[in-house]
Image (cartoon, rainbow, N blue to C red):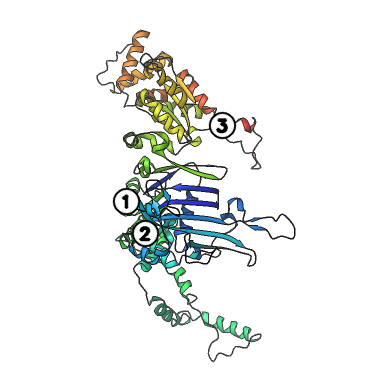
Amino acid sequence: MKVVRLTIANFRGIKSAELLFDGHILMVGTNNVGKSTLCEALDLVLGPDRLNRFPPVDEFDFYNATYLVPPPAEDEPPQIVPLRIEAVLIEPGAEIAAKCGGNMEFWHLGEQRLLGPGELAAANPPDVVPCLRIETIGKYDPEEDEFEARTFFSHSPDAPEGELTGVPKPIKRLFGFLYLRALRTGSRALSLERGSLLDIILRTKGVRTSLWEKTIDRLRGLDIEADAAEIAPVLRSVERRLARYIALESPGNATKLHVSELTREHLRKTMTFFLALSADQGHVPFPHAGTGTINTLVLALLSFIADLKPETVIFAMEEPEIAVPPHTQRRIAEYLLTKTTQAFVTSHSPFVIEKFEPSKTLLLARKDGVLSARRVSDATGLKDNDYKRFARSGLTECMLGRAAIVVEGVTELHALPVVARRMEEADPNLQPLDIAGVAFFDADGESNMPKFGKFFKTLGLRTFAFYDNDYKKKRKPEQAKALAENFEINVEHAYKGFEDLVVAEVPLDRLWSFLSALQANDENGNLAIPDARPPDDALRALAREALGGNKGAGWAARLFEECELHELPATATAFLASVFALFPPPPPIDDNGEEAEAAADPDEL
């Protein structure tokens, strides 16, 4: 079973949304754009246990907490404003189709829409497939002064006119939906609380255990006082004092200690899974294991669930990378893509993001409460092979930030961040670029810069370019136009290469000091560095040869580390100063913890 369309109205930060899905989906976007809200919406409409909460929704599950509209007149009742989440599911499977056949409709795969009345003749496979449309409606009940939420079949031909048929929990369980917040709250994963992963496994396997009756019987017979005789006199004293006010007619002792409330629900909350983590360590409660261990074990439970229901497993997972190493992150992503029917994932990890094709990556945006989504491949035009090639070399890191500084080579990629850091250390009024969410990206050549500028700009990032003029003679007008259009700050410096910029603008004394240190440390390799300082032009040529021949070694960055602030190239510091100016630091905090007044008009920042 797969979700092909999700429609949302008046839910949390989303006033309205209609999103189309095609298989596995990675959701990306700025913080608070609505990624977690989408997962919660899926849980409300598909999850079998979400509506068991009391109340299932509250005031802030409604957009701007608006669940009532004041009446136009005093003698009229207020208007109830519901929240509504609808999902269209295809590939329902034989069991669901048999049980929900009267509620089935048809979905056109190519046109991504429902067939309407009078289009039954067009319901021909493979272009058109059966689908099931369900919706959850949440609203405030003024008579009960409570919030309620129920899930219905949107197409309910057997229901009375104006009403919908409810979706029973057993049907929802057949959907196989799991909302994996468990990686954040792994301590509950192996409890027996309702909705925990272990509870889901037991219910999926159809286990009806006699655990509760037997355990309660044993706990009831456990005589705690026999092992703590000093407690008995205190209890008897309590009984005598109670007897002054309450008639205690029990033939034996009226008070007794037990280790729990002797109810199923209390035992579900108190039972704890123990785990031995090493040969020299005894069993410890599962929550006491390391966070990474907890999350990895949770993954094992998830794979167990998927194996139990291989035909229908829909996962919604937030940030699967939490507290797990990169290789495990990749395994989680690979597992989701290969072992599940459909996965909805949010992530801030490049190791997870790189596993999803651009066509499976949705860029979310929200304006005035309206949430929209575009496939990254459609929005940016970046080819899949470019996406895969650059995913691990900074592309995904930039995607998760606020701005990207795009450079044309590895030397600039290593050297400019050093210049930025030196500027930050020297001026406390500068907000560090990494805190501001600004990342550097090597486009591997000026010819690639426009397409990556467009890619980042379409994602909603601010874009800045820094490149040399060696390409100028070959550059076509449309290429120059593309650079100007896709970069907010578009700096073409005056030199034919970054190494030329460095040797022209770094003082000669500093260049010679750097070269002398290379020779003294026997790091110059085949580069012939004389014992005596050569003439100025020869010194610059030698430094140019050293930096140009060791791009991958990061010698330019190393040189900048040794420079005083005033010795850094003025062209580079001026470019970075223009970037810093766009990301001012937050207002300072005074001694009372209050924000000081901003020096500038906040509308101008």
The reply to whether the C-beta atoms of the residues labelled 3 and 2 are less than 8 Å apart is no
Q: Earlier in the sequence, mark 2 or mark 1?
A: 2
Give amino acid for label 1. Pro
Q: Residue furthest right?
A: 74
Give the residue displayed 46% in from the left and 68% down from the top: 269
Distance between mark 2 and mark 1 Cα atoms: 15 Å
Above or below residue 446? Residue 459 is below
> Looking at the picture, how far across and down is residue 210, in whole percent?
38, 77
Using the image as rendered, state which of residue 544 and residue 151 is in the foreground.
Answer: 151
> Looking at the picture, how far across and down is residue 173, in whole percent?
40, 64
Q: Kindly state the secondary structure of the residue where label 1 is placed.
A: loop
Q: Nearer the viewer, mark 3 or mark 1?
A: 1
> Looking at the picture, how far across and down is residue 524, in whole percent?
28, 21
Distance between mark 3 and mark 2 Cα atoms: 53 Å
Give the residue displayed 34% in from the left and 37% down from the top: 392
Give amino acid for label 3. Pro
The numbered disc on residue 584 is 3
Q: Earlier in the sequence, mark 3 or mark 2?
A: 2
The crowd level at tag 1 (other Cα within 10 Å; few <14, some 14-19, many 20+) is: few
Using the image as rendered, state which of residue 3 and residue 173 is in the foreground.
Answer: 3
> Looking at the picture, how far across and down is residue 145, in whole percent?
64, 65
Distance between mark 3 and mark 1 Cα atoms: 56 Å
Q: Which quadrant holds residue 515?
A: top left
Quadrant showing the N terminus:
bottom left
Give amino acid for label 2. Pro
Above or below residue 46? Residue 472 is above
For the image, the number of numbered tags is: 3
Q: Which residue is mark 2?
A: 92
The reply to whether the C-beta atoms of the residues labelled 3 and 1 are less than 8 Å apart is no
Q: Which residue is mark 1?
A: 126
Q: Kindly state the secondary structure of the residue where label 2 is placed.
A: loop
